């Protein structure tokens, strides 16, 4: 429950502030009107109905990053670690396949994937980026 609360809080913070700063540096900036994250970029989602392919580029400071998939009420994919081929400042491509059984998908809601790193000292979530996989109405 604590992780879900943290994820929802981070989503709200990201929605409210167009730029965020970590150690005095913007981690989200605008490029051609689109938000660009300094640790994850070019993230694209393909798929629907519980089957998704998520591709993008990452440059995690720690050499690895994590993701979780949820809808604000339920976690569909528990925290999963991805070891990057390269570390900051180099970008490396990634591809993640997500499969959620159709019976678990919400009737009304948004399935969201959160990419993030963990702070070395505290294990706190940092550099959080929400990615909408699918909206259900």
Image (tube, helix red, strand yellow):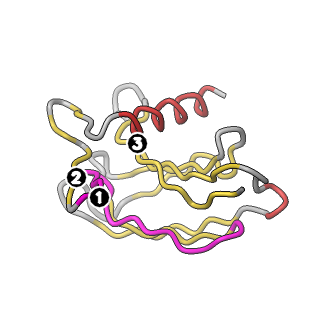
- According to the picture, the residue beneath numbered tag 1 turns out to be 34
- Work out which quarter of the rendered image holds the C terminus and state it: bottom right
Q: Earlier in the sequence, mark 3 or mark 2?
A: 2
| Residue 72 quadrant | top right
- According to the picture, the residue beneath numbered tag 3 turns out to be 128
Residue 64's x, y, as percent? 38, 52
Q: Secondary structure at mark 2?
A: strand
- Horizontally, residue 126 falls left or right of residue 135, namely left
Q: 10 Å neighbourhood of mark 1: few (<14), some, or many (≥20)?
A: few
3D distance between C-alphas at marks 3 and 2: 17 Å
Q: Which residues are magenta?
A: 33-50
3D distance between C-alphas at marks 1 and 2: 5 Å
- Horizontally, residue 101 falls left or right of residue 22, namely right
- According to the picture, the residue beneath numbered tag 2 turns out to be 30
Q: Secondary structure at mark 1?
A: strand
Q: 10 Å neighbourhood of mark 3: few (<14), some, or many (≥20)?
A: many
Q: 10 Å neighbourhood of mark 2: few (<14), some, or many (≥20)?
A: few
Q: Residue at x 72, y 42 (%)?
A: 74
Does the stretch in magenta take in 45?
A: yes
Residue 126's x, y, as percent? 37, 36
Q: Nearer the viewer, residue 80 or 131?
A: 131
Marks 1 & 2, CB-CB < 8 Å contact = yes
Closer to us: mark 1 or mark 3? 1
């Amino acid at each position: 429950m604590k992780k879900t609360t943290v994820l929802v809080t981070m989503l709200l913070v990201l929605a409210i502030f167009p730029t965020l700063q970590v150690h005095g540096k913007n981690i989200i900036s605008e490029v051609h009107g689109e938000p660009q994250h300094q640790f994850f970029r070019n993230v694209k989602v393909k798929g629907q109905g519980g089957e998704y392919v998520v591709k993008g580029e990452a440059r995690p400071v720690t050499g690895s990053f994590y993701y979780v998939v949820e809808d604000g009420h339920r976690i569909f994919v528990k925290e999963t670690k991805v070891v990057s081929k390269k570390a900051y400042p180099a970008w490396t491509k990634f591809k993640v396949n997500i499969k959620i059984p159709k019976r678990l998908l919400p009737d009304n809601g948004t399935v969201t994937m959160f990419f993030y790193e963990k702070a070395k000292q505290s294990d706190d979530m940092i550099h959080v980026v929400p990615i909408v996989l699918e909206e259900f109405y």
